[in-house]
Amino acid sequence: MDIQNALAAPAITRREDYRPPEWLVPEVALDFDLDAARTVVRSRLSVERNGAHGEPLRLDGAGQELLAVLVDGVAVNDWRLDGGGLVIPLGGDEHVVELEVVIEPERNTQLMGLYASNGILCTQCEAEGFRRITYFSDRPDVLSMYHVRMTADAARYPVLLANGDPVASSDLGDGRHRAEWNDPFPKPSYLFALVAGDLQVNKGAFTTRSGRDVELGIWVRAADLPKTDHALYSLQEAMAWDERVYGREYDLDVFNIVAVDDFNFGAMENKGLNIFNSRYVLADADTATDYDYDAIAAVVAHEYFHNWSGNRVTCRDWFQLSLKEGFTVYRDQGFSADQGSAAVNRIEAVRTLRASQFPEDAGPLAHPVRPDSYQEISNFYTATIYNKGAELIRMMATILGPAKFRAGSDLYFERSDGTAATCEDFVACMEEAGGVDLAQFRRWYTQAGTPRVQASLSHDDGRARLRLAQATPPTPGQPVKEPMLLPLKVKLFGAETGRALADERLVLLGDPAETIVFDGVTERPVLSINRGFSAPVVIESDRSAADLAFLSAHDDDPFARYEAMQQLMLDALVADAVEGDRSNADAVVAAVADTLDDPALDPAFRAEAVLLPSESFIGDQMSVVDPDAIFRAREALRRTLGERLAERWAAAYDGPREPYSYTPEAKGRRRLRNVALGYLAAARGGAADKLAFTQFEAADNMTDRMGALTVLANGTSDLREAALDIFYSRYRDNALVLDKWFQVQALSSRDDTGVAVAALARHPDFTLGNPNRARSLIGAFGVNQRAFNARGGEGYRFLANQLLELDRLNPQTAAKLLPSLGRWRRFDGARAALMRAELARIVGAAGLSRDLFEQASKSLEG
Ligand SMILES: [Zn+2]
């Protein structure tokens, strides 16, 4: 089958084709007659011709029935529908256009536009959902003031919320009621939101530093109300942090967050009315892990921070998506770092980058942080735009230093407030405020791929020479790469004395190769490089196992300590997986022992540092990924560490028990204890299942319960089934916790996981209709490297079947789960052929969405 079939290929949108809008819409009034089966939307648009041209008004639209079109109060019929859009010929420069359309929220399974989720009506408009509510100029550079009126059944939808501030409400006397909201800040349509439902609120307050009293509300169903305190607290912390760190203040009288169960993303920053996936709102000790708590704080902060980086200053076009997302992820990372351990926070951010962005950069879907083209913009909500985008902001902050970076941020907000801006606008402000030349740095926005830096250190006559050479591998459409500007933090330590031989240096590597000279180096130096992960690159150095072990014990940068340990472990694991060479295991054991014994390190850091790299990250280091060899090598090293350090794990595990509390210290101790449990299980095999089961039953919090269940789910004893059954019975009515039950089985290291996952897909509680549930089973299985890549290809076939089914309901979520199949070039010929066959089957399927077609066809081409 020919995937080059031009007829099947959807249109490509290109950045270079950007033109300013032909018509502006300074004001819009929306009137909703809300009903799950049939909602009538009346809109009143004030439109203005933008510049001198004779073009008609073109409005975007999809999935609605158009009932009426009026221009300046008069019904007209010279309009036409063109490729889903509405074209209205207009003379003159200013008009009022009125439209009436009908939509069907309860039949909206894409979850874009206005839809129903468990009895709640809610919206999701980013990126192009608003056009599924009514015809509109649905692009981010058309900014409008919104006035919204909602009428609905008072019993079914007692709460009616929209953007901005509430201005009126009334009881219509016939069982229906009405509310009106006004948003004084011009915004693009993707930030529109409304919610109607039977909701309860956890109210809070915040007074801004200039004295504005803001009423905060976390809106959920009544039963969930006790689980909203953490989200409310996180919101208040985030508001104070943004004033303190970025000088940004909130600007409306109310700020509302609503939790819904069916949501394609994590959350959405609609002006004054954030809509959240309930997993990023609801938490209590019994149902949420420490990781969940941290994620809630981070996502609440992220969406709140968008009020400035995204809403007050929005994006000119979707190619600039990283302008708001990269910056806002960087801001939420800073917030999280200040809430707990900055070192652990950085480790987690880098782990995420390596798990999701590096493979993207190395695969068929690689794209620059500011892409040049797309078929479906929903496919570009990627780790590259978000996480690599955040690293770009971090590098600029490193190059400028804190004071100048803050000055650049102030300048950006001041200059761009109320506009739709570009990535270039942001960089220009940093350049101006920082007094630096970022010309070469801009390549980070245009070149895809992860740069690789070769570093080698030589030493003689009291002088050390560090030779650095950089190269970025080719990516689709970009065969040749220019050298990048890489900010690399470097420090040398004395191998004998352990002391620092000089202050940390910030090397700005811009040439393909460069040699840095250090004078006064009187003993053999050990190289600490890319400290704090100052550049998102791969470092290839010739440091010995002994030097890495030395750094893991002595480096004064906590990230560099972690990194040295990871490299030591990776080298050992790859040597075993490729050549069966286990000679480096001793060095790993000694380094892990040193880390566990170091009283200066907090438990959270120790827990992170002693974890082995993931199977997929090990695979990323190999020319051909061998999932079975990687699994064997990793299990062998886990067992060796478990056995040889048995007393230390037991000591870490058996420490004094404490009642649950959510503090950074208690979290760190829980983390270390659960990591220790994992190593005890690796050493003792089935004998540890009893220990895990005891913890599972005695746990007073979800972190400990899931820690134990994870060990049991990987095991083979009868206790495994018992624990899974108990967990299921206890939480079968809690969708978010039941997601964990599916996920822990999909991630299991057991030999029969593929069969188990196929059976779970037929479980009565499994549904592709809920994105969280689909991700918990299908998404988790796709990243279980060994199970998914089973030799016969049944994992590939299973995923393809599920994606084809999911695509009919929810193309966005289906497309996001496809990349596991696109990694075929990284595997042996037999596996690659099987993966390609499934990709070809998807591309050839009838009625495929634009979302899934783009991902699958690009993955097949490579
Ligand atoms: Zn965001």
Image (cartoon, grey):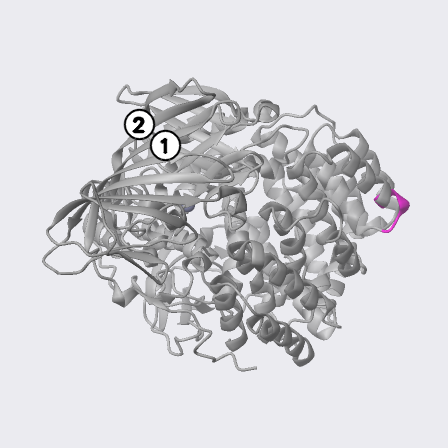
Q: Could you tell me residue 201's position as x and y percent?
A: 50, 22
Q: Write down the region rendered in magenta.
A: 716-720
Which element carries disc 2, helix, strand or loop? loop
The answer to which of 98 and 636 lies nearer the viewer is: 98
Inspect this view and state whether residue 13 appears.
yes
Q: Which residue is mark 1?
A: 272
Residue 178 position in % (x across, y down)? 39, 24
190 or 302: nearer the viewer: 190
Question: Of 507 and 539, which appears nearest the observer?
Answer: 539
Name the quadrant where ligand 1 sits: top left
How would you classify the magenta stretch by its main secondary structure?
helix
Across and down, in percent, residue 243 comes to: 32, 30
**Point 47% across, 31% down: residue:** 196
Q: What residue would you read off at disc 2?
A: 252
Amino acid type, mark 1: Gly
Q: Quadrant of residue 312?
A: top left
Answer yes or no: disc 2 within 8 Å of ligand 1.
no
Q: Are marks 2 and 1 in contact (CB under 8 Å)?
A: yes
